[in-house]
Image (tube, rainbow, N blue to C red):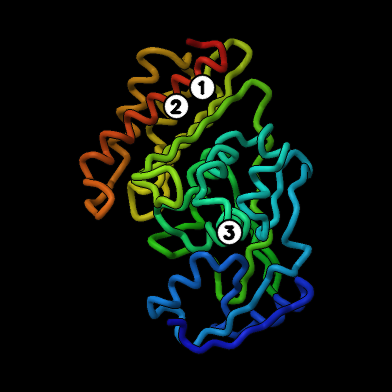
Amino acid sequence: MLPEYGSLQPATLEEAIGALAGVDDVLPIAGGTNVVMAMREGEHQGKMLMDVTRLAELRGIRLENGYVVIGGGTTAAELLDSALVAEHARPLHQAAQVFANPLIRNRATVAGNIADASPAADTAPPLLALGAEIELVSATGGRRIPLDQFMVGVNQTMRRPDELIVTVRWPVPVARSAGAFHKLALRKGSACSVLSVAVMVGVDGSGRISKARIAMGAVAAKPIRAYTAEGALEGQVLAGDAIEQASRLAAEAAQPIDDVRSTASYRQRMAGVLTRRLLTEVAAELGQE
């Protein structure tokens, strides 16, 4: 049963930011797929919910000064339908394909998935692999924070109560690059991740790795990047020993727990297995089998 709550429906971004200024109990809500469940469990007591679904400023997917920019109110279904996302963010497009179910994909937003800061958030590993940053605005100005710094713990972020996530953006990947994502879950639909892995690799003219990112979800208190594994890949050809070493280091970076979905030992092992599979897939795409 939902607790009593008030509601606001701003018509513009300026109005929404004004409502957040200096008030700690206003909670922005779009799809509500996480917030409503939390309210039923007794969280967010006494909150004033602010519906931001009408804000045109939070919608759309576009190219801007070498970045792919998506509005915070963009839904998972819109990610799935976007040619820009399919072209410039394959891991995110793949994550949208397995995001919950069609009904939730039509409601759940990117900003909501990130702001909820679940360790198992489906969009987080691909966005981390893409090098995404979060743009926030408030009555006092705006700021951008790299996603790997924005999430700080379970359901904890660097967003202040007076701020609203307006966009998520990442650099357009270099011409010779490829990425992939895989979500391991107990069933195909409407399932929380047992763990997920996303990779993004770019190579230079000599065929050596110029940039590598490996991100994992549901293996720590927040979605993480395997920095040591990434560093081991740079300057290497994506094949054989390099893939094996990166996969081992990615597994070592995982700090999973036992819970109702899996044991920690299984998650740690599969972190390495999935990293190996995805890097092998990307190597084939880049012609480095």
Residue 216 sits in which quadrant? Answer: top left
Instruction: Say whether marks 1 and 2 touch (CB < 8 Å).
Output: yes
Which label lies toward us, 2 or 3? 3
Quadrant assignment for the N terminus? bottom left
Instruction: Say whether marks 1 and 3 touch (CB < 8 Å).
Output: no
Residue at image position (66%, 58%) is 72
Local crowd size for mark 3, using a 10 Å CA cut-off: few (<14), some (14–19), many (≥20): many
- Per the image, the residue denoted by label 1 is 282
> What amino acid type is highlighted by mark number 1?
Val
Residue at image position (77%, 74%) is 14
Local crowd size for mark 1, using a 10 Å CA cut-off: few (<14), some (14–19), many (≥20): many
- Per the image, the residue denoted by label 2 is 278
Residue at image position (46%, 59%) is 117
Q: Nearer the viewer, residue 114 or 152?
A: 114
User: What number is the disc on residue 227?
Assistant: none
Alpha carbons under labels 1 and 2: distance apart: 6 Å
Residue 170's spot in the image, x, y percent? 64, 43
Secondary structure, mark 3, is loop
Q: Nearer the viewer, residue 105 or 87?
A: 105
Residue 49's spot in the image, x, y percent? 59, 80
